[in-house]
Image: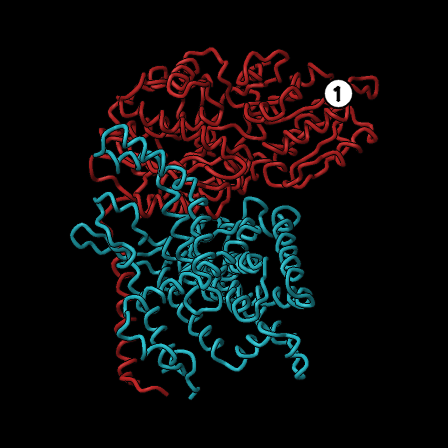
Chain colours: A cyan, B red
Amino acid sequence: MLGLEKKDFQLLLVVAGLTLLAPFILNPFPESSGMAQFNAGYPDLMQRFVIFGIFAIGFNILFGLTGYLSFGHAAFLGIGSYGAIWMMKLISLNVIPAIFMAIIVAGIFALAVGFITLRRSGIYFSILTLAFAQMSYALAYSVLTPITGGETGLQIKSSDSPLFSNLEEGEIGRANLFGMDMRASFELNIGDWLFTFNAGYYIAAIAMLASFYLAIRIFRSPFGMMLRAIKSNQTRMSYTGLNPRPHTLAAFVISGMYAGLAGGLMVAMDTQVGPERMFWTASGEVVLMTILGGVGTLIGPVLGAGAIKYMENILSKINKDVLHEWFAFLPDGLEDLLVTIIYPFIGKGWHLTLGILFMLVVIYLPGGLVEGGQRIARALRGKKANDEDGPKASTEPAE
Amino acid sequence: MSKSNFTRRGLLKTSAVTGAGLALPTIFTAQSAHAFTNEPTGGTVTLGFNVPQTGPYADEGADELRAYQLAVEHLNGGGDGGMMNTFSSKALQGNGILGKKVEFVTGDTQTKSDAARASAKSMIEKDGAIMITGGSSSGVAVAVQALCQEAGVIFMAGLTHSNDTTGKDRKANGFRHFFNSYMSGAALAPVLANAYGKDRKAYHLTADYNWGYTTEEAVKASTEAMGWETVATVKTPLTQTDFSSYIAPVLQSGADTLVLNHYGGNMVNSLTNAVQFGLRDKQVNGKDFQIIVPLYSRLMAKGAGANVKGIFGSANWHWSLTDEGSKAFVKSFGTKYGFPPSQAAHTTYVQTLLYADACERAGSFAPCAVAEALEDFEFDGLGNGKTLYRGADHQCFKDVLVVKGKENPTSEFDLLEIVEVTPVEQVTYAPDHPQMGGAEATLGSCNNGA
């Protein structure tokens, strides 16, 4: 189907199913229960899941296939965002042109940066990209304040009147898709459960599925094969008469455009841009996402993005009072002890939890969460499927 | 191709159904069951406390959170009631807000606009927060304020000193109690003229971001108005930690006063460098060299240690104030946490009380009703004397403190002394003042959301 092998198509279907049913899957706990704290099915976080999923998928095309570790990918995300918000401020509040603008701007910038940085490889490449990203951040933060709004960033204001819009005087424009507000949601109450279906989320989800599909096609194409060749042995590739530069540059630009798409979507969902979107920690985050999920796998980066965003938004909001509520049934001394033990790992300590998880994954599951999933699947299937499944997975002739 | 049961027709059908399913939700959103965003229906009302718990301003954030918890305790009738007893409005009963028990959720802004907005959004969308408050940087305040405007909840700004928050970026749903750059400049200028004379040559070092710009502009304008001359203004990167290369040219410029438009760690480092260079022992143009720090905080004074001695600056509030409100607040904060509150704690505590009081007086949680109750509201007894919440830009107008680093501090909290309380008339400006975005800046219309 769709030019994919059966296995890949199934994967695409699974991902499509998961994203479309996310409002149900992410809200497993009833509203009034204490576990509702762990529900993640509200629009903002769902949007973040898929948007950072796109960002990580794009990053993985570069890092997973060619092995070039870009440490400045957030710059493309930020530049895409600035492109998108200016499009909305000046031309139209429709998200489609804004998103396309984001992709184009990020693509052009990636071409320029890639042209320079790809002259080096390994650590030098990483440092160069990091330098570019920090330069962009510093410029956006101060020197380019008239264009970027500096520290405060850019928002749509009541004084903005885009070319194609019919806003009333003083009305603040809202991102929309042919009149459909990105923040429009439909709430479904079933018993004690509340499921929110948000317009913006589904638009981002469709963009994510399209990106995912494109990524599969790239992974399975001769171009993808070429990129893998670069990763495994660039010197040998040069000796066989192939020039790796155009391929890495293409991968870099594609990956930059993915980041631009993510940036554009972020603006479409929440019409605000700040320079810290380009800060080096944001670039580091996408590296973490990809490694946590599984470098070079298709679904890994999406899982990694989900895991990190979940911790950032859910774990960080658990405070001491919530803990005391949970353990209120225990005797006082024990309650305090448990709270004291757990407290450093939640709330503002979520970075610590993330760090520990990251270390565990890197040490015990070098293939990321995907490898974890595979191991579990293998263990579940146990001995009975041992023979049929073993050797077949690796070598299937292309059709 | 692999074998599969998917047919072209089947796919079309499925996509049509999916499309219809996707379109369906938007039909229903027009009519909503609630009159405004997150209308509290049960016996509780949820407030969202969005403060930096990690990053450079985590200390301020922690103090803000303490103040919020204290405010919630007082609103729910616990503790000694703090400033509720001295507050001129007596609408608050100590039984929550409008009879509903106050609950709260907390989040981490990380001092980044993106993270702050994500956190605020989750409070609004997931936890049903009816009001968002907090933050300790202007970029975050402006970003979250705009979000609250869109979502239709009230935003009560925490520590934000840039003119823009209630200047060019003011919003109908956003309110600020803290003072701003303009007020700092206006309050400092006369005190400086008295202490250092009217013919000084000032040299500005300014943190290269939004707050730095507005502070430099404000201080420059008000000192020039009384006769000072500005020799040069130099921007310093926010991430700078060693300012010696910026200090050296100051002496060659012929300036006799250095203004450090720096906050937090920046100020601690630049001031320390300036003092180490012996700037304060120098004589220029026959006068003693002086240093000024427009915005002071206790945490900064602590960081700079002995270097702050005798250096002028401005503050929103200080725990050594002796009015009834301040004493009550310092007492209940001190009883609960064992040390005096910072000005960040004070402003956030006051904002929470003001919000609760406005709800009581409006008889509703609807943002537009609350905003109306806050606009042009005059009150007293919250530590700053008589205060006006101006309706035109949602900025509080009150006396501003001019403070000085204490010569002989008695404890690690007793680092600043109040030199003068500048009366409110002197720091008041027109809502369309050029430093505040001029005539273009508007609040827009208030948004009830939903």
Q: Quadrant of the C terminus of chain A?
A: bottom left
Between B56 and A266, the one nearer to me in the picture: B56
Give the class, few, some or many, for how many residues have Cα within 10 Å of label 1's Cα (few <14, many ≥20). Answer: some
Taking the spot 50% from the left edge, 58% from the top edge, the residue there is: A286
Disc 1 is placed on an element classified as: helix
Q: Quadrant of the N terminus of chain A?
A: bottom left
Q: Which residue is mark 1?
A: B280
> How many numbered discs?
1
Q: Is residue B219 above or below residue A148?
A: above
B159 left or right, relative to B289: left
Q: Quadrant of residue B91?
A: top left
Taking the spot 21% from the left edge, 44% from the top edge, the residue there is: A32
Q: Is residue B211 visible?
A: yes
- Image coordinates of residue A143 in percent, x first then y, are 66, 48
Q: Is residue A90 visible?
A: no
- Image coordinates of residue B31 in percent, x first then y, are 24, 54
